Amino acid sequence: MSAAGRRPQILIVEDEVALTTMLRYNLEKQGFRVEEAVDGQEALLRLTENVPDLVLLDWMLPVVSGIEICRQIRRRPATQNLPVIMLTARTEEADSIRGLNIGADDYITKPFSMDNLLARVRALLRRAATVPVKGQLEFHDLRMDLSTHRVSRNGRMIHLGPTEFRLLQFLMQRPGHVFSRQEVLNAVWGRDLHVEPRTVDVHIRRLRKALNGEGELDVVRTVRAAGYALDTEPV
């Protein structure tokens, strides 16, 4: 997403002043440009004025919640592919899954190590910047245009977040092949980042929901105890 030679810009949406100060210091030390928003309303205004390269988004915010901001980010054409990392004090798995289902690309629970956060930021920015700039992938009635970052099915436009786009791209490159969760994690999230295997399941569900319209064949096949494949054959 970032142009060559330009420092990536990160929007921190966080109402804890001490945490924001620490994040700004460490991110700027690593060469990032940083903007801040102390509540959801200010965040939405900043996103309208200037789209950053990545958002660090607190779950619990005054005025407008982080969950609602994430929903709106995914609804807006200008920000629907914007990488989002949720920062949350909630440790329950159901809460983490809810954040991913809403559209977050990653989440990290407080308190967290700065090295861990920086690794996740770099991984998301790297993935956003390495999507091939041209070419087209096709499978069954699915079309993926890598130059325009658009996906369609039977002529119907499908809106995907950046993680779902890379996930579908990975599956479409070898249709019919069954990939284990670990293979998907390595390809889509990267080998240098620890992500729970359950995260794959959440994004697969999001991908299915986006791809499959009423009466359409589910082209994402779950192979019990093995993994996932893009396939038109019944399980």
Image (cartoon, grey):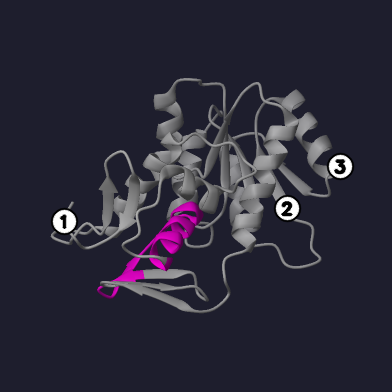
Q: Is residue 34 magenta?
A: no
Q: Nearer the viewer, mark 1 or mark 2?
A: 1
Q: Position of residue 97 (x, y in %)?
A: 41, 33
Residue at numbered disc 1: 234
Mark 1 and mark 3 in contact (Cβ < 8 Å)?
A: no
Looking at the image, residue 150 lies above or below residue 178: below
Counting from the top left corner in percent of width and height, residue 219 is at: 25, 59
Label 1: few (<14), some (14–19) or many (≥20) C-alpha neighbours in 10 Å: few
**Label 2 – label 3 distance at C-alpha:** 13 Å
Could you tell me which residue is drawn at 66 percent across and 34 percent down?
38
Q: Is residue 167 left or right of residue 54?
A: left
N-terminal-most mark, 2 or 3: 2
Q: Which residue is mark 2?
A: 9
Distance of mark 3 from mark 1, alpha carbons?
Answer: 52 Å
Residue stretch rendered in magenta on the structure: 152-173
In the picture as drawn, the residue positioned furthest to the right comes out as 29
Observer-nearest residue: 172 or 90? 172
- Please indicate whether residue 46 sits to the left or right of residue 96 in the image: right
Who is closer to the viewer here, 192 or 17? 192
Q: Is residue 143 visible?
A: yes
Which mark sits nearer the N-terminus, 1 or 2?
2
Q: Earlier in the sequence, mark 3 or mark 1?
A: 3
Amino acid carrying label 3: it is Lys
Q: What amino acid type should be assigned to the residue bearing mark 1?
A: Pro
Tell me if I can see residue 46 in this picture.
Answer: no
Q: Determine the image quadrant of residue 175.
A: bottom left
The foreground one among 104 and 165 is 165
Residue that mark 3 sits on: 29
